Amino acid sequence: MTITLKSAADIEGMRVAGRLASEVLDMLTPYVKPGITTEALDKLAHDHIVNVQGGIPAPLNYQPPGYTPYPKSVCTSINHQVCHGIPNDRPLKNGDIVNIDVTVIKDGWHGDTSRMFVVGEGSIAAKRLCALTYEAMWKGIVKVKPGARLGDIGHSIQTFTENQGFSIVREFCGHGIGLKFHEEPQVLHYGRPGTLEELVPGMVFTIEPMVNAGRREIKEAGDGWTIVTKDRSLSAQWEHTIVVTETGYEVLTVSAGSPPPPAFVNG
């Protein structure tokens, strides 16, 4: 496994890209309400990234081996869609939940982040799933420090999530990131403490748990990209890009509108 460690200058570049990605989500927030289409949100995001930020939307035409090129500039995954939902012309409805996943390339560096949005008045169950998935991501983030292992992150997320009666999707994981969209290491959201790669300063990766209200099994929806829960239960995901520092971690995907960390983070 070849993990690229980032220099101070590299991390500064990633900090800029991460802030820009988060600012796209800030910009979109007031528009996420009943009646808007995910296609309209995609266009807003695309125009902001290209014309305001002078960046490149990484997902547009992204083509991993075996896939068709991704046709849009952001991913929008609604309700039982787990990830990689393609924006379309279906209006969002009151009570929908939607993950918007944004990756901005700026000066070659990738900033990757996603947030959950509850459209209009969500059900108590939907809001609880979104809130607990956010906490699950942070349960992983707070484990990041030199000498810790990737298994510590996965174990912390998995135990918290399963103790709440939810399940963790295992087929998709966090990933190293930098000049490439996806680098080593893979960051699993389940696992055993004390296993897998040791964390060292300069490692940069995403933590992005996908949490299902029902069972963890998933399937591909038929468009070549969208992943859904097999039992059609709701699914939620949050994502931050993290750098391992000398003393712990720094979240690179933050902006004025970022939700604050849960109370346990600084407690």
Image (cartoon, helix red, strand yellow):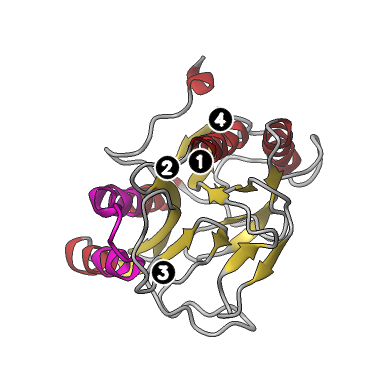
Which tag is nearer the camera, tag 2 or tag 3? 2
Q: CA distance from mark 3 to mark 4?
A: 28 Å
Q: Identity of the amino acid at label 3?
A: Ala
Q: Can the viewer see residue 205?
A: no
Q: Is residue 100 left or right of residue 29?
A: right
Residue drawn at x 41%, y 61% is 103
Residue 248's disc is 4
Mark 3, mark 4: which one is toward the viewer? 3
Residue annotated with mark 3: 58
Instruction: Pick the residue in front: 25 or 10.
Output: 25
Amino acid type indicated by mark 2? Gly
Q: Which residue is mark 2?
A: 122
Contact between marks 2 and 1 (CB within 8 A): the answer is yes
Question: Which quarter of the figure is the N terminus placed in?
Answer: bottom right
Q: Is residue 97 magenta?
A: no
257 with respect to 231 (left or right)? left
Q: CA distance from mark 2 to mark 3?
A: 30 Å
Label 3 secondary element: loop
Q: Which type of secondary structure does the marked residue at label 1 adopt?
A: helix
Tell me if residue 57 can be seen: yes
Camera-side mark, 4 or 1: 1
N-terminal of the two: label 4 or label 1? 1
Please tell me whether mark 4 sits on a helix, a strand or a loop: loop
Magenta span contains residue 20: yes
Q: Which residues are magenta?
A: 19-45
Q: Which residue is mark 1?
A: 130
User: Which mark is first along the chain, 3 or 1?
Assistant: 3
Q: Is residue 61 above or below residue 25?
A: below
